[in-house]
Image (spheres, grey):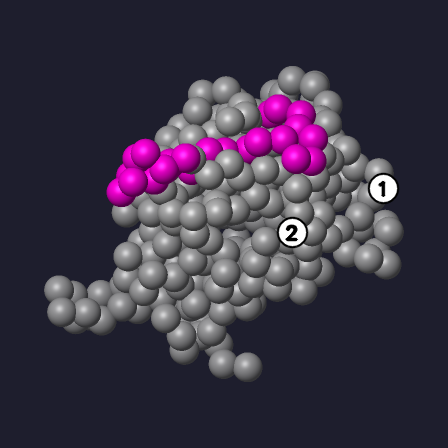
Amino acid sequence: MTRSRITSTVDFEKNGKQTGFLRLPHSVHESAYGFIPIPIVSIKNGSGPTVLLNAGNHGDEYEGQVTLMKLVRELRPEQVQGRIIFTPAANFPAAIAGRRTSPIDAGNLNRSFPGDPDGTVTKQIAFYIEHELLKLADYALDLHSGGSSLLYVPSALGTLHPGDAKRNAETIELLRLFGAPIGYVSNQPMGADQTFTAAAHRQGVLAFGTEMAGGGTVTRSALRIAEQGVRRVLRHLGVVPDIKTEPSPGTRLMEIGGPDYFVYTSESGVFEPLVELGAEVKAGDPAAAIHFSHTPWREADVVRFERDGVVLCQRIPGRTERGDCLFHLGTDYRG
Ligand SMILES: [Zn+2]
């Protein structure tokens, strides 16, 4: 396999706190010998597992980015038993643009794994994360929020792998410990084998993620959930045994299944939500009205839920086009 062209200014084998950059060579009109500086931090001390904390996978999802930036500044090496590697702005071009995807190549990092060392900038970042960083890790957290187009009930989410009962049980234990209002599991994760968590699984790393609020902003309550959840996980894994945390308030364990959990718009128009986030709904209940700007006298089209469930996520922008997801549901986990 070809090696990544990215080099790290941080030596992951060295003890102490190191801050630096992953240098991704990027020769462009404005900077012939330039590189893209992806911030990276390693804190290593004593013996214990390696945890990779990733945020900014999508650049417009901020609670995870803020959580990691604050933690990087707070933690002292002597508090750590093992190693924590932080990538608070993993898709750095997307993060500084405040966009889901990279302005350089339109790449969605969380649909770019396993990546390509000779590919576009985003593919190169994915390749480095999967084949260099995850190779070092025992555990990984990938902190997302809803981003510009979605709003979530703050959730932690894990992927279950059929036939891997021990690992699935550990994933569920970590979701409960994280203590978001919802902890949901899926056998059919979004993006299937192209996501960070899929990459982690390929590398034998136990990983889970979050969906903290969204709407392209920082929500104070969701930030607090993310911060407390990450701290509890680091303490539980023994990597930062004395970190200050509050006890987990518990989580409502849910699952998302097939296509009937998702509601898509029927036509293009203005999206009027007819339910609140977090509502319990029944199959056949009205989900949204789609209004037609070109023919305002035309009756609005009502989109309905196809199954019972709890509304975990809704679309944010008012304009909608055919193909847009308006809502997705969860149902209580039946293990
Ligand atoms: Zn995301």
The quadrant the N terminus occupies is bottom right
Residue 225 image offset from top left, x and y in percent: 56, 25
Q: Is residue 312 above or below residue 131?
A: above
Tell me the quarter of the picture where residue 214 sits.
top left
Tell me the quarter of the picture where residue 208 sits.
top right
Residue 188 vs residue 209: left or right? right
Q: Residue at x 70, y 39 (%)?
A: 307
Q: Residue at x 13, y 69 (%)?
A: 29
Residue 184 image offset from top left, x and y in percent: 69, 38
Tell me if the residue at label 2 has its CB under 8 Å from ligand 1. Answer: no
The numbered disc on residue 259 is 2
Residue 329 vs residue 68: left or right? right
Q: Is residue 146 visible?
A: no
Span shown in magenta: 278-299
Judged by depth in the image, the label closer to the viewer, 2 or 1, is 2
Secondary structure at badge 2 equals: helix
Membership of 291 in magenta stretch: yes
Residue 175 vs residue 55: left or right? right
- What amino acid is labelled 1 in the image? Gly
Residue 219 image offset from top left, x and y in percent: 44, 24
Q: Nearer the viewer, residue 154 or 115?
A: 154
The numbered disc on residue 335 is 1
Q: Residues within 10 Å of mark 2 (few under 14, many from 20)?
A: few
Mark earlier in primary sequence (2, 1): 2
Membership of 21 in magenta stretch: no
Q: Nearer the viewer, residue 58 or 72?
A: 58
- Label 2 and label 1: CA atoms lie apart by 19 Å
The numbered disc on residue 188 is none
Q: Nearer the viewer, residue 270 or 251?
A: 270
